[in-house]
Image: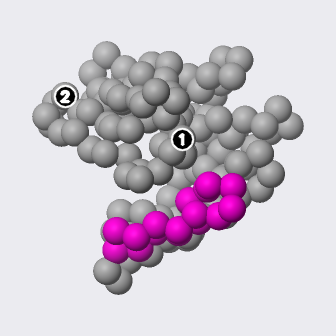
Amino acid sequence: MTYSYDELGRMTSKARGSYSASYGYQYDDRMTSVVSTFPGDPFITSYDYGGDGLRRSRIPEVGDETWYNWAGFSVINEEDYDGTGVGDGTLNRTYIGNLGDIAGSNPATGTERYYTHDHRDNMTMKVTPSEKNFTPLFPNSTSAHAAPPR
């Protein structure tokens, strides 16, 4: 995998074989867009932020929009919104501070994921106990873009 960064240290692109992704940002390091050909990624995704600088929504080219709910400056969960009024506001992920998250509409039965951090509190690895899986996040990067949205 190859990575490119801008002068501020933000990842602007990555590529592996015939797959690639590019990332757009606005001031304050806020990611505003992703264009990706990686399998499983929506082709084009954009992000919106509130006046307080917190990410409010993720809008894929295809599929449900995701809304982020906050308690102060910590994201607490995500909800799906498809614009039809049916199933809008369906809980799909609950965050456990900066330590991990639980996927699914019921935190008691969802899939747990935890994160390890480096000395700068950047997430470095995702740990999924049910799958016995350890996944490095953004190798060779000191970026915290893998963190829950801010």
Q: Residue at x 51, y 45 (%)?
A: 142
Q: Nearer the viewer, residue 82 or 59?
A: 59
Marks 2 and 1, the one that precedes in the sequence: 2
Q: Is residue 114 left or right of residue 83?
A: left
Residue mark closest to the camera, 2 vs 1: 1
Chosen colour scheme: one colour
Q: Residue at x 40, y 70 (%)?
A: 2
Element type where label 2 sits in the image = helix
Q: In the rendering, at what x and y percent does residue 145 appear?
A: 54, 45
Q: Can you see residue 91?
A: no
- The magenta-colored residue range is 1-16
Read off the residue under disc 1. 144
Q: Residue at x 42, y 22 (%)?
A: 99
Quadrant in the picture for the C terminus: top right
Q: Nearer the viewer, residue 37 or 107?
A: 37
Q: Is residue 28 left or right of residue 11?
A: right
Residue 74, above or below 66: above
Residue 114, above or below 124: above
Residue flagged by tag 2: what amino acid is it?
Pro
Residue flagged by tag 1: what amino acid is it?
Ala
Q: Can you see residue 109?
A: yes
CB under 8 Å between discs 2 and 1: no
Read off the residue under disc 2. 129
Quadrant in the picture for the N terminus: bottom left
Q: Residue furthest bottom?
A: 18
Q: Is residue 146 magenta?
A: no
